[in-house]
Amino acid sequence: MLQYSYRPNFPPTRQTPTEADQCWVDYDPIVDRPPLRWPDNARLAVMICPAILDYEFMPPGNPWLNPWARTEPPDVLGYCRQEFGNRVGFWRVLELFDKYNVRPTAVVNVDALERYPDIVAAMTERRWDILGHGLSNTRFIYDYDEATERAYYRAMLEKVEALTGVRMTGMGGSGPQAGTGNTPDLLAEAGFVYQSDWSMDDQPFPLRVRAGKLIAMPYPADMMNDVTALASFEADAYAESVKRQFDRLYQEGTHSGRLLTIAVHPALIGQPQRIRYLEQILDYITSRPGVWHATGADIAGYYLSNYYDNALARLDRLRAGGSR
Amino acid sequence: MKLTQTGSTDHIYYRRDPITKRKALRWPNDALAAVAVVVSAEYYEMRPPPGAFIPPNVPGGFGRGPYPDFRNYSVRAYGNRVGIFRIFEALDRYGLRATVALDALTVVHCPQLLPHIARRGFEVVGHGQSVTRTISSRMSMTEEREYIRSTLATIENATGIMPSGWHGPEYGESAQTPAILAELGLRYVLDWPNDEQPVAMTTPNGSIVSVPMLVDFDDVYALFHRKITEARWQQAIQEGVEQIVMDSTQSGRLLVINLHPWLTGHPSRIGYVEAFLEFLSQHDRLWLTTTGDIANWFQTQSASEATG
């Protein structure tokens, strides 16, 4: 049950003129890359991302994306289903993170921090990391020009720091929207270290930006994201998929380190019939040696310090037709 | 060129003889049934050219979003960056040679993939320009001929080998596709999932063989569109193979399984691919081969029947 839909025949968006289809990512087969080694030679870095979301009861219309596609807003059913996450589900999920001593990276709509101060207090006390997810899951920036989008990131960084003390290092688009043609450049310019919208790999990789540096930190759009998984299956299938994903990446991690990002939405996984499956997942992923349980800031920071420059230099050589 | 019969809304490509009434087909080496694996290497554009036709059910995420849709692009790009190598390594483990359906934009944007295909000796078939530019009857015949010709030329220039087979992106064809494929010298097509044996097609430009890939075995149709679990999909493939083998005692049948690395190349799914590949490799009555070898064998058998 996904409440979004793209509008039929949505208008064009501002486009960054480039020759190629996209200008940010170089094709780079995972088997051709030099090995990636995580701290303490861990096989696998695991990052778990609970979503703290804001959904508006009566959001303004958007020509590209319909936030409440089931009915004209208000969609009381859809709204309540999401709000359950911040009222009830979050507290169940929090208890499990405490029990398994996992420090997550919360995916945050910044407006939710103002609405739910108790959640902010719980996160702050436990030093959770924060991955920005726009202002609200019912607001989209397709029509932002460069100056507006630049101001938007600056305002979010400052607001989150003021409310939580965390200087965000990562950002991903709100809802299913991913941003504009300027987004990677502007994220790098604003001081973000990574963007989470590129779910195309099992390792971090460098993005090409106008100035500065930006890492793609793959964030799941598939069965590792409970939204997608639970739209079609129950939580047992989600937990089984995560365990299988973990096992395979753990096995491959002996050759070259892998990244597993697990997205959980307290509105869904925090429901009474499902929370036990999150417990299964946490129990499983914390029971193996050689796993680096880390936050987005930790992983991106490590990659930036140890791999980014070499990875980009190698891609430059490949582009120039040189050897690997 | 007339591709339909006068007064008919149907096409003229093949006869309607039921599988029970055909001459017996025998596969090589006393195999009862033939099984082939197709791996679709596809490029999904963030920004297709104006006028490109994309079927509304092209899978991934919430559907196609406005530019720049990093997310849907990424879901598909995972296939060529990561997933395809898990599938290739699984095929290596069981000593299987696959057919790679390769589109032109993968050749252009993912050139480092090509040596991984070549060194395994996999067959390559043309798979259109990209999954975001599919063939449909909106194209004129001239446009479609140029689309297919340029796809094949791109592959031949990059790999040195002219493909003998064709698989339209998203199984996309127009009413005239088989005739154009025959005109351009292709020997077989994979887009007509209607049978368990190859089908001889005749067109005004000569003949072409259809090697059917039953779409309910296709990973995207099973796992993404129909949402069955991976375990059930694996079981269904094995049950299908067992049935085909049983039904092949009078006349040999075939099964072609089309895999999409952006989906079944994921760590959580590859184990099921490995499991059915192991099942296939341990079965002693199967001819495990490429779709090109199947088309060749069928053509040779048909020709020897015609002359003998």
Image (cartoon, coloured by chain):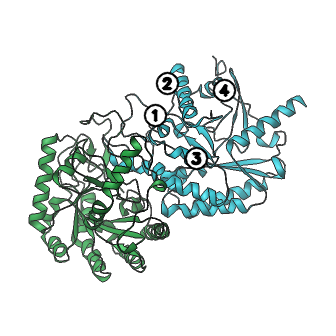
Chain colours: A green, B cyan
Work out whether residue A292 or residue B31 is closer to the camera in this orientation and state it.
A292
- Is tag 2's residue or tag 1's residue first in the polypeptide sequence? 1
Q: Is residue B126 visible?
A: yes
Query: What chain letter is assigned to the residue under label 3?
Result: B
Work out whether residue B257 or residue B93 is closer to the camera in this orientation and state it.
B93
Q: Is residue A216 visible?
A: no
- Is tag 3's residue or tag 1's residue first in the polypeptide sequence? 3
- Is tag 4's residue or tag 2's residue first in the polypeptide sequence? 2
Q: Residues within 10 Å of mark 4 (few under 14, many from 20)?
A: some
Please tell me whether residue A21 is drawn above or below residue B26 in the rendered image.
above
Amino acid on which the number 4 mark rests in the picture: Gly
Report the side of B113 relative to A57 (left or right): right
Q: Residues within 10 Å of mark 3 (few under 14, many from 20)?
A: some
Q: Secondary structure at mark 3?
A: helix
Q: Residue at the spot x=82%, y=39% of the render?
A: B22
Provide the residue designation for mark 2: B139
Q: Quadrant of the C terminus of chain B?
A: top right
Query: What chain letter is assigned to the residue under label 4?
Result: B
Query: What chain letter is assigned to the residue under label 2?
Result: B
Provide the residue designation for mark 1: B133
Provide the residue designation for mark 3: B117
Please tell me whether residue A225 is drawn above or below residue B21 in the rendered image.
below
Q: Secondary structure at mark 1?
A: loop
Q: Quadrant of the N terminus of chain B?
A: top right
